Amino acid sequence: MSAKIINGTAVAKGIRAECQKRVAGLKAKSNLIPGLAVIMVGDSPASAVYVRNKVRACEDVGIRSTVINFPADTDPETVISKIQDLNRDVNIHGILVQLPLPPQFRINQILGTIDVDKDVDGFHLYNVGGLVIGDTVFPPCTPYGVVRLLEHEGIPLEGRNVVVVGASNIVGKPMALMLMQRDATVSICHAKTRDLAQFTILADILVVAVGQPNLILPQMVKTGAVVIDVGINRLPDGRLVGDVDFEGIREKASHITPVPGGVGPMTVTMLLVNTINSAERSLGIDSPPQYPL
Ligand code: NAP
């Protein structure tokens, strides 16, 4: 078997075209331009690349983005005060704080300052809690992007065995909750899981979000499984790879996402979707039903 390679770039492009139309509609009908504020503390080169990608993606669809940079030694109160200003700013519909933050910050305190209705990353405790009961304001972008990819490929979730490898607050845990919400049977594995392969081999759908190249080898995957590789790893030779042995597993899986060009482009795209949804809600417009939780 040779797996179908899920082209996240192409799926994301289609969704971005819809985003562009929705932004144009908001401008034409209500003279409103969706606004996203991105707060970055410190000068991590990786964060700078992510922020640049988000800004570019916003430009592509007509969202107005503002980046607010603070030096690494900034007092948390200064950032909190800026977030409070942005909460009050009617031209800003989405606020995100680029993670990680320097050590003097308590992440939950910072994220908890963001107005729930502008929390387009979906990391505020209210939004995280909403995932548990299947009713959140903004689904977090990476797992949301994975769900959209699975939907696009027509992969059913109900009753399927899904194994999520990685249990972080921003990917693995919300991913598991969103899949449970769709009636999948979900197992979550993490660094202390004993004998990872005994779980992964049972997966109809395997989602891997760890940050370790070649963690998942072909013998750990069931024939015909759907493999979603969220991991992003830079090898010493400069190549970008995911967490799974792509070449080996594509011979066994039914579907697989490449890295790059799989989940990555979807993450940024779902940020655009969340920001546009927020702008529409600010006018009392319901977001399109094709974007359920
Ligand atoms: P993270 O916060 O470092 O979490 C990694 C998770 O993997 C933790 O839950 C950890 O377990 C688990 N883990 C570590 N070693 C393991 C092992 N040997 N077996 C099973 N589980 C193991 O990372 P993250 O932020 O979730 O990101 C994960 C990866 O996805 C990274 O490569 C990141 O760059 C990538 N990512 C990609 C996108 C995208 O858009 N494609 C978005 C976000 C992140 P413990 O909880 O027990 O420590």
Image: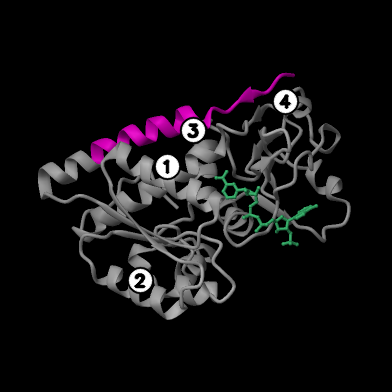
Q: Which residues are magenta?
A: 1-22
For marks 2 and 1, the one nearer the N-term is 2
Q: Give the residue at x 59% y 73%.
A: 103
Q: Is residue 124 above or below residue 269?
A: below
What is the magenta segment's predominant secondary structure? helix
**Mark 1 to mark 3 CA distance (whole Å):** 14 Å
Dot 1 corresponds to which residue? 269
Image quadrant occupied by the N terminus: top right
Please state which amino acid type lies under the numbered disc 1.
Thr
Please state which amino acid type lies under the numbered disc 2.
Ile
Residue closest to the far bottom: 77
Image spot of residue 60 (x, y percent)? 32, 36
Dot 4 corresponds to which residue? 250
Image spot of residue 134 (x, y percent)? 49, 61
For marks 1 and 3, the one nearer the N-term is 3
Dot 2 corresponds to which residue? 83
Nearer to us in this view, 132 or 12 = 12
Local secondary structure at mark 4: loop
- Please tell me whether mark 4 or mark 3 is closer to you in this view: 4
